[in-house]
Amino acid sequence: MLRSMCLVLLAMGIASGPCPARADRISEPPAEPAPVFTRSDAWFGAASMATVLIVGFADGALRDDAWMAGGAPARRVADLVRPLGTPQVLAPGLLLGALSGRLFGRPGLSSASVRIAAAVGASGLACEAIKVVVGRERPYQSPSDIDEFRPFSGHDSFPSGHTTLAFAAATGIDRETTSGWVPWVVYPLAGLVGWSRVHDDEHWTSDTVAGAALGIWSTLKVEDIAHRRDLSKLELGGLVSGGRDGARLAVRLAF
């Protein structure tokens, strides 16, 4: 997990290094409020649903090909990248990015970290809601039946939460930086997270495709709203006080 967190911090730190965050390049908000949902969203949703359905027909064959394939080297790669789709790695990395930007006089890094965190959080909530409604069984629960859906049953295979968070973070980092190499790093890493879930027999391939689409779309929406409403300021207030019960640290985040 420590190695995975270092990958997150490295991507954020280097990507925001010599190039300013895109937030710094945003001028006055538009006079006319842009619609939240557009025709592009409809096309993206339709294309995503079609892709999920097409991939879904091959879920069984793809599981047979990917499940535990590659031996020990593949397991090591899966173990390395899997935590990149977990809150335990993403949350500390984003919080550290916000605090570092504040402490070292880089407000662009702070505000970008906050926006990415909001987008990742929204993606995770949407993913959990869909999981509850769809109720798809995981591959190891119904290996011979790829179409086992039982809404509100507690089964939570569709969509993949790890993949959703990984692609949400990748999209946020890409959106908040100007370095041309960033997409070539963050999206393949997110793709490896999705592959690890199929390799571990935790998800069908269509689960990961749906998670990737959800993470990308929800992050773009949250980022658009955050930029339009100028949610770009991070305020950190720290208060340390002593008392009978010892020291107390209060940190206030406002944006």
Image (cartoon, helix red, strand yellow):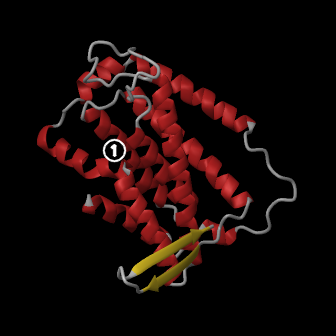
Which quadrant is the C terminus positioned in?
bottom right
Q: Is residue 33 visible?
A: yes
Q: Is residue 52 left or right of residue 190?
A: right
Single out the residue that lies furthest toward the bottom.
242
Using the image, determine if residue 35 lies above or below residue 133. below
Q: Is residue 200 left or right of residue 128?
A: left
**In the rendered image, which quarter is residue 236 located in?**
bottom right
Residue 182 percent coordinates (x, y): 47, 60
Which quadrant is the N terminus positioned in?
bottom left
Q: Is residue 178 visible?
A: no
Query: Residue at horizontal 87%, vertical 54%?
Result: 32
Per the image, the residue denoted by label 1 is: 192
Residue 105 percent coordinates (x, y): 54, 84
Query: Residue at horizontal 41%, vertical 40%?
Result: 161
Query: Residue at horizontal 35%, vertical 57%?
Result: 89
Mark 1, residues whose alpha carbon is within 10 Å: few (<14), some, or many (≥20)? many
Task: Choose between 82 and 148: the one closer to the eye.
Answer: 148
Q: Is residue 28 left or right of residue 204?
A: right
Residue 195 percent coordinates (x, y): 32, 38
Amino acid type of the residue that numbered disc 1 sits on in the rendered structure:
Leu
Single out the residue that lies furthest toward the left.
72
Task: Choose between 14 and 210: the one closer to the eye.
Answer: 210
Tell how many labels: 1
Query: Residue at horizontal 41%, vertical 30%?
Result: 207
